[in-house]
Amino acid sequence: MPDTSVPADSNPRDRGSGPVSSARQVAVAAGNSHSTTRELWRPAHRGGKAMRCMLAVALVAGSVFGSPSDTTDADHGVRRGETTMKIYYLEIVTTEVDSVCAVYAAANGLRFGDPDARLGNARTATLPEGGLVGVRAPMHESEEPVVRPYWLVDDIESAVAAAVDAGAELAHPPLEIPGHGTFAIYIEGGVQHGLWQR
């Protein structure tokens, strides 16, 4: 797989509001104004970087795996014909590949396969709805751990153009991975976002 890491000069922590502000907005939007949630995102918090990564994994995993109390589209006010967002690929970059796979397997019943060279040697597991979770090591020294969801789109070129027109910074242009589809990465709100077209 081509290098999907974001260059050091595009580090989300160096842009705009950063993860502190974004996390607070997410917590408030979710109706969680507890100080403990916000404390995890304060840079001075002991182990803050690790805690921010763990909270990001939990938030994204909740949207990918769901929970026993998941509600239907009708419960969320989604009408037929409206677009719904689906994560097709959840990429986790970590120096602890085997332990992350073991935790996901234990907590969610996933079965990870051997490394897939087309996905940066990520160990992947197929999700019940057809998406993938991929856990891989950094591909170079400057690549930091990240949890990057790739949203499934019908037309990646149009989706990238719309994101850029709305103010996002393109970090990786659309690139086809034979046998998997086409991906792109953009940065907005201090967060890396992926798009995926099958």
Image (cartoon, grey):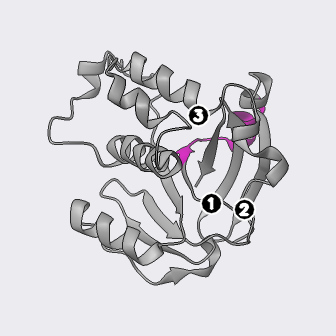
Q: Within 10 angstroms of label 1, few (less than 14), some, or many (20 or more) residues?
A: few
Q: CA distance from mark 1 to mark 2?
A: 6 Å
- Residue 40 on image: x %, y %: 43, 37
Towards the viewer: 110 or 50: 50
Instruction: Report the residue marked by disc 3.
Output: 19
First reached walking from the N terminus: tag 3 or tag 1:
3
- Farthest bottom residue in view: 114
Q: Is residue 154 magenta?
A: yes
Badge 2 element: strand
Q: Which mark is residue 176?
A: 2
Q: Is residue 73 magenta?
A: no
Disc 2 packing (10 Å; few <14; some 14–19; many ≥20): some
Mark 3 or 1: the one toward you: 3
Pick the residue in front: 33 or 75. Answer: 33
Residues at circles 2 and 3 in contact by the CB criterion of under 8 Å? no
Q: Which residue is mark 1?
A: 181
Q: Secondary structure at mark 3?
A: helix
> For the magenta stretch, what is the residue range?
149-161
